[in-house]
Image (cartoon, helix red, strand yellow):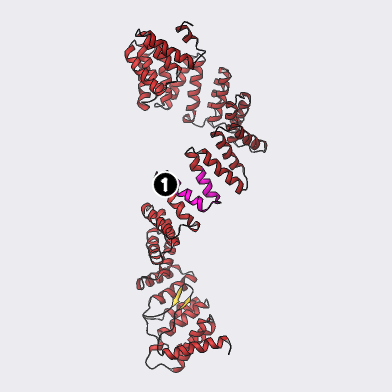
Amino acid sequence: MNSTKSYLYLLILLFTILGCSAPPEQAVGTQAKSNPAQKSVLQEAHIDQRAYNYYVNGTIYETMGNYYEAAREYARALDIVPNSNEVRYSYAHALQGLKDYTGAVSNARKIFPRNADTWLLLGDSYRALGKFDSSLAAYIQAAKQDTMLVNAYYFIGAFYQQLNNLDSAIWAYQHVAELTENYQAYLQLANLQLQANQTENAKASYNRSLELDSSASNIRSYLGLSAIHEEGGDRETGKYYLILAAERAPDDQLILNRLMSFYQEDREFDKALDLAKKLWAIGPPEFGLARRMGILYYNLDSLQNADSIFSDLIGRGDNHIVNHYYAGQIAVHLDSLEKAKYHFAHLTAMADSVVDGWVNLGMVFHKQDSLQTEIQVYEKGLQSMPSPEDSLILLFSMGAALERQKEFDKAVVTFEEVLRIKPDHAPSLNYLGYMLVEKGMRLDYAEKLIKKALEIHPDNGAFIDSYGWLLYQRGKYKEALKELLRAYEFIDKDPIVLEHIGDAYQALGEKDNALKFWNLALEKDPDNQALKEKLGR
């Protein structure tokens, strides 16, 4: 006796022993073949023996996966007992197995009353036929009749998600998650809740998903929690979950890149550089990553390494403005001003609307004491700025350069232009106010400017010094000294503040204190001739 015949004989024997019991469940497609709520053909009191034999044969064939023969046997039984819901359901189920979804629907629709399994069969078949509205309606009916039917809720959720009906999709997936206690179900639920701005619910679902599976398979839950906490302003917790994700997926470039950005923003440049090197090793090497490594070396004051990277990138034809910007900055730090000038000039030629190139190019000429050329750079840059707001930085730099060039009136006009564009531009308020105080001109106007700057930044030492110096110029030496000493609390190494304090003490007749602060100022500014004269040197 071969194995197939043995299996068939065993099933027939079991049916004979069980008498009128229902057939075992058959898992086909998305559902199980069972019909407990409907009257079974095997439970009918006076069933035709032939129908019984056909039904048993069909069940056996279906168990073996032979849906064609199963459908033939069920059809023969149905010819004899056309009103048997069990036989018709089995026939429809076999047709579904044959992918005859139209036939499956036609037969399932003849079953009354319909239980959850019949509705589920209709839902699956309608879905296969592309009749999504009918499929959704059938799944809803299946779920109403059997609240434990996971597949029905799953497909309901999927349909509503496609329709962007988030509330209904969430309702369905909540049932899926609660019934299956599967990490993927909670992950899907959390993603939908996050999309619907149900942040706290999403957080709870992601956490539940991680309770069920905290391995690398569930990376998306870590990333979801990271995003929620970061968006909520809790960057540390956001970074914590990102670190956990990186530990579980150490070669995931997207995660490593995001974590590297966190470290950069938190100025943990050494950790960021370690990740950059890891990404470089994972490969493939690319210009963008090399630029980030160069920036990290620059921020770690490893200027030679940074310069090597940017020079190599430029030499290989990567003319990104970032390369020239940092190569120029490095050259300034290394006192290679001609090299810095080359890179910043290149930057302005490549992107003339980017203010940083013009500002830094002007700064190089300032360091070379080419004040007139510095001013010309700012004037040229202003012609390329797309809006008045973009011009503010250049105007401020030009105002300062004009003041150093002893072109006082032009400097005043320039700073007033800044304040016309942005009345609360605190640096310009203070700079213009201090210029006027130094000249002893329009002191009421200067006071108004400086006080406005202090309203914006009350703890700015330079602004406090300007106000103290205004009081000094008005002969209010005690009040002036009080403000100047307060400025000293914020900027105790500024030679101008130190000199002003010395001057205030001198005006109050406190010669020893005056000498003390003048000496401190000279230590910070040893070439200051005015200080030397005050000290009699």
The region drawn magenta spans 233-260
Q: x%, y% of residue 309?
A: 62, 36
Tell me the residue at 48%/84% (across/down). 59
Mark 1 belongs to which amino acid?
A: Thr
Residue 337 appears in the figure = yes
Between 365 and 261, which is closer to the camera in this rendering? 261
Q: Does the magenta stretch include residue 386?
A: no
Between 358 and 292, which is closer to the camera in this rendering? 292
Tell me the residue at 38%/52% (across/down). 199
Q: Is residue 95 left or right of residue 315?
A: left
- Above or below, 434 against 279 in this view is above
Q: x%, y% of residue 506?
A: 38, 9
Q: Quadrant of the N terminus?
A: bottom right
- Above or below, 504 against 229 in this view is above
Q: Is residue 83 left or right of residue 70?
A: left
Q: How crowded is mark 1: few (under 14 residues within 10 Å), some or many (20 or more)?
A: some
- Above or below, 378 against 138 in this view is above
Q: Quadrant of residue 369?
A: top right
Q: x%, y% of residue 169?
A: 40, 61
Element under disc 1: helix
Instruction: Name the residue carrying label 1.
Output: 237
Residue 83 appears in the figure = no
Tell me the residue at 39%/27% (across/down). 424
